[in-house]
Amino acid sequence: MPDDSDEIRPTGARCGLPLRSDAARARGTASGQPVPEAVSPVTDAEFARFCEFLYRRTGIHLTPARRAYADRRLAERMAATRSRSFAVYFARLRAGLGGEAEQLVNAFTVNETYFFREEYQLRCLSAALMDRVAAGRPPGAPLRIWSHPCSTGEEAYSIAIWLLEHWGAVDRYDIEIVGSDIDTRALAAARAGLYGARALMRLSPDLVARYFVREATPLGEGWRIIAALRDSVRFSPCNLMEAAAMRSEGAFDVIFCRNVLIYFDDASRRVAAGHLHESLNPGGFICLGHTESMSRISPLFRVCRFADAFVYQRPPEGEHV
Amino acid sequence: MSEPAPSVPPRVLVVDDAGLVRIYYRGVLERAGFAVDEALNGIEALERVLAGPYDLLVVDVNMPRMDGLSFLRALRRREAPWRALPVLMTSTEAGAGDREAARAAGASFYLVKPVAEGDLVAHARALAGWRP
């Protein structure tokens, strides 16, 4: 299994194609190698104000350890908006000029992933979770799976492909797969479904041939998800911290919520966990990143140990944790 | 040297409202050598079938707008060749009444979901009268 360090992986292959030097920088950061840093564009006092703004807006809690990462993102946004100083940039941000708040959120969320990442969780999905949530449902009933945050869509499509290949009852239920993210640029990329070779590294040539169409792009060779599969997965903007937005997506049977709660502080984590609990049908399951633990966040979930993975469950109706 | 003409793959229309089911059946049938088109409901299926030709239809019973049985009855009211087109019905309903309703509407065969890959291929080949 490739390194899946859950420390910050700064924005990488934004549209699924290997774009800028971010991915390389991210690897350098994750592996602890020194990364040349520019001088900080902001003072400590300014940084504190910025952190408070970002936290109130998104629940993302920047610790001092992530200062260098934050500086890079901030410098990018300041350059993009031609702001000569932090004060100018921050005024623009607070005034909501040019949709800057959304741009900023996009810059601060992480988008590097690939197909069949965390295969053990997908195995658990087809070997245990699907049968359990389907039990007692009439044939043809909807089974709803949520990839949240879905970033550029690799996880949501991976779930679809995995179930098509590994769950024998895939035609017995009305499976709905939804991908949600706070990052609207990532969602646009998810809907487009165009990926670079790196995103496909874990897929066999057979699977690539079955579910992708090769396509030349300005950035090199790409692979686009077949239209039927793109049409079968829905992508929608949603913020884990917003109760109304979460509720509007309805209730799910399985939620993949990987490596996002680590961005939050304890208070935000509890709020997000509460929202996720409400978004699950009773008896529904939630899969977190492999270093994350719901037990440390919320008492609302039951820990379930399956052959392939630890998963958290909203207890079935009438049962306790 | 003249090569024997390759046998033309039979054309199948898969009719199901669930996208993943269409992808699954299409994949199975294409790997078995069929040429596959898709429709999302009975109305779309009728349009496609009349524009045909198809050698086999794989049709779900429960669909919005026009369900599989209504589609089948509409198809069987038409003249040959549509009246005689082989139709493999698929459904999540396993009851004797459901099978009988499909037979009465003109289904050639009835498979209860989940349909195993081997069963779909075997019945599709038998109904289309074709082996690669």
Image: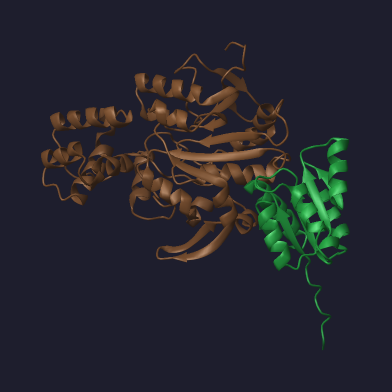
Image x and y of residue B53, in percent: 75, 68
Give me the chain that's brown. A
- B81 or A86: nearer the eye? B81
The answer to whether B113 is drawn above or below residue B72 in the figure is above
Q: Quadrant of the image for the N terminus of chain A?
A: top right
The answer to whether B36 is drawn above or below residue A202 in the figure is below
Q: Please indicate whether residue B102 sits to the left or right of residue B51 in the image.
A: right
Q: What residue occupies the far front of the structure in this picture?
A: B77
Q: Colour of chain B?
A: green
Q: What residue occupies the far bottom of the structure in this picture?
A: B1
The answer to whether A267 is drawn above or below residue B44 in the figure is above
- The residue at the point 60 percent across, 44 percent down is A160
The answer to whether B4 is drawn above or below residue A222 in the figure is below
What colouring does the structure picture have? by chain
User: Is residue A226 visible in the rendered structure shown here?
Assistant: no
User: Is residue A23 visible in the rendered structure shown here?
Assistant: yes
Asked which quadrant contains residue A90, the reply is top left
Image x and y of residue A95, in percent: 17, 38
Q: Please indicate whether residue B4 sits to the left or right of residue A301 in the image.
A: right
- A132 or B76: nearer the eye? B76
Image x and y of residue A164, in percent: 66, 45
Q: Please indicate whether residue B39 sits to the left or right of residue B2 in the image.
A: left
Image x and y of residue A6, in percent: 43, 34
